[in-house]
Structure formats: structure tokens, C-alpha cells
Image: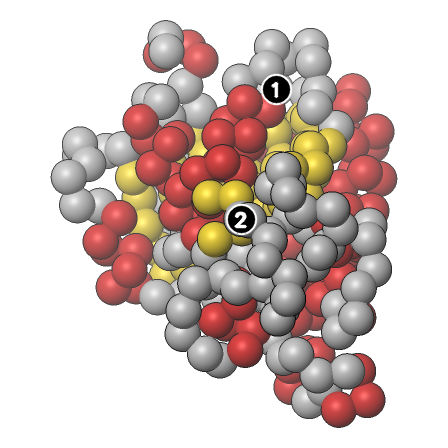
């Protein structure tokens, strides 16, 4: 990759799963990356074995716009101007039906999945526009488009992100900023253990042995979208395991 093609990419939710895979692939392709996450020790481990100046890490809770703004203001000069934003941070909490779901779980999902995207986009947008080749990638979910039992709040938050991205794209089309929504299906990450509170790999409901994608598969699709020529915009990608028919089947 030529230096002129390299980017400065801001990645949220970088401590695990798709976010961590994006960091690794982007650095390997010669991009500089700003990695955000809540777990500082995990962020520091991302630096191991990387050349100096390839990665900047910062602990940040995307629910708090002041924290996002502070990370941006404190960026070393080598990591400015940011021209690419990957809104990846997100989570699902609980397996309950809506009538028994804790209000705290509802609030955390809405604040992280929805407001986190708005906070990072709001803070980074001036930089993306100034770069004249900005790109926003929103990691949504096929759950945003295919309803399923117990999806309720999580699916709604991802539908919010999908519609936000789809509406933002024409608004920014004439300002040199592209927008891509990426909707993964079942991915082998910490998603299920965070959702259920039980450690372990992603598992399908009993009787539904569904294969999974790797986080690397989704990260590769994101990199592909970023590497398209600037006159081309990948509006949306829906990426699922070959054996997955619907959201959780």
C-alpha cells in the first residue's frame, strides 16, 4: 500500500472481537489506528509487537461524549487528522423477554449502541469532512433487519444505527465522506458471553447448530469497503455464515 493510500482510522470497541480484528488488519495494511475501549489492559496488549507509531490506544466509554471528546483532543499529532471512523462498540444484555428485562440493561444497550455511535460521529465528523476522503463504517447486525425472539431492544438499537447511517450517507455524499453499514450474522466473539454473563464461545440455541463467522471475516469485509476507490461507496454489507438462514437460525 502506498503512503498516499494509508488512513488514520478511529476504531471503537477495539479490545475484542470485530474491533480487535479490525485493528490488526488495518495496521497490517499500513494504516495508523486509534483504538478505543473500556479495558485499558487489553488495549495495551494490542501494542505488543507493533512498530512504533502504528497504533494509539485510549481507554474510553463511548456512552460519555466528554470522554470521546477528550480522547480526540489528546491525540498525538501523528494520529491526526482522523479520516476514517469505525463505529463498532456495541453489546446485547440479557436473554429475557422484554417484560422481564432490567431497565439498566435497556439503558446500557441504548447508550452504548445508539448514543455511542452518535457521540463518536459527532466528535469526528469535522475531521472526516476536512480530510476530503472521510469514511464512516457502522457495524450493525442482521438483527436490525430480521426480527427474532428476545431481540427487542438490541435489534432496535441496531436498526437505529442502520437508519442513521443510511440517512447520513446522502447528507455527506457531496462533502467527501462515505458511509457504509456492515451487518454481520453470528460471529465467534465475546458477544454471547456478554449477553448471558456466561464465559465461553458463541453458541447457538439448543437444537440449532449454526456455524459462525470469525471476527477476521467481518474485519476483512470492512477493509475491503475502505479500500474501494473514492468515487465508489459501498452502502451496505450483510455478511452471514453460509449455514445461517436468519438472525439466530
Q: Residue at x 70, y 24 (%)?
A: 234
Quarter of the picture holding the C terminus:
bottom right
In the depicted structure, whether residue 68 falls above or below residue 1: below
Tell me the tag on residue 212: 2
Quick one: label 1 or label 2, which is nearer the N terminus?
1
Q: Which residue is mark 1?
A: 132
Q: Quadrant of the N terminus?
A: top left
Residue 204 coordinates in the image, percent (x, y): 59, 63
**Where in the figure is residue 195, as x and y percent of width and height?**
56, 73
Front of the two marks 1 and 2: 2
Q: Residues within 10 Å of mark 1 (few under 14, many from 20)?
A: some
Classify 10 Å Cα crowding around label 2: few (below 14), some (14-19), many (20 and above): some
Q: Residue most toward the front?
A: 207
Instruction: Give 74 or 39, whichever is nearer the viewer.
Output: 39
Residue 72 drawn at (x, y percent): 45, 48
Looking at the image, can residue 30 be seen?
A: yes
**Circle 1: element type:** loop
Residue 83, compared with residue 16, is above or below; it is: above
Give the left or right position of residue 134, taking residue 219 as reference: right
Amino acid at each position: 500500500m502506498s503512503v498516499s493510500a494509508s488512513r488514520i482510522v478511529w476504531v471503537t470497541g477495539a479490545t475484542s472481537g470485530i474491533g480487535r480484528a479490525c485493528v490488526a488488519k488495518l495496521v497490517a495494511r499500513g494504516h495508523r489506528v486509534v483504538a478505543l475501549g473500556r479495558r485499558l489492559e487489553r488495549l495495551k496488549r494490542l501494542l505488543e509487537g507493533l512498530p512504533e507509531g502504528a497504533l494509539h490506544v485510549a481507554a474510553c466509554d463511548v456512552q460519555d461524549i466528554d470522554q470521546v471528546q477528550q480522547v480526540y483532543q489528546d491525540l498525538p499529532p501523528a494520529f491526526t487528522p482522523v479520516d476514517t471512523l469505525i463505529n463498532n462498540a456495541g453489546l446485547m444484555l440479557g436473554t429475557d423477554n422484554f417484560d422481564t428485562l432490567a431497565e439498566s440493561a435497556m439503558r446500557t444497550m441504548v447508550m452504548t449502541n445508539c448514543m455511542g455511535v452518535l457521540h463518536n460521529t459527532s466528535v469526528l465528523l469535522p475531521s472526516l469532512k476536512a480530510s476530503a476522503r472521510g469514511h464512516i463504517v457502522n457495524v450493525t447486525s442482521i438483527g436490525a433487519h430480521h426480527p427474532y425472539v428476545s431481540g427487542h431492544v438490541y435489534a432496535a438499537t441496531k436498526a437505529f444505527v442502520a437508519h442513521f447511517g443510511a440517512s447520513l450517507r446522502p447528507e455527506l455524499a457531496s462533502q467527501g465522506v462515505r458511509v457504509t453499514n456492515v451487518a454481520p450474522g453470528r460471529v465467534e466473539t465475546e458477544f454471547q458471553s456478554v449477553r448471558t454473563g456466561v464465559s465461553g464461545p458463541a453458541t447457538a440455541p439448543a437444537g440449532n447448530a449454526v456455524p459462525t463467522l470469525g471476527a477476521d471475516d467481518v474485519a476483512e469485509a470492512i477493509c475491503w469497503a475502505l479500500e474501494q476507490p473514492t468515487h465508489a461507496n459501498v452502502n451496505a454489507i450483510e455478511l452471514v455464515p453460509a449455514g445461517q438462514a436468519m438472525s439466530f437460525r
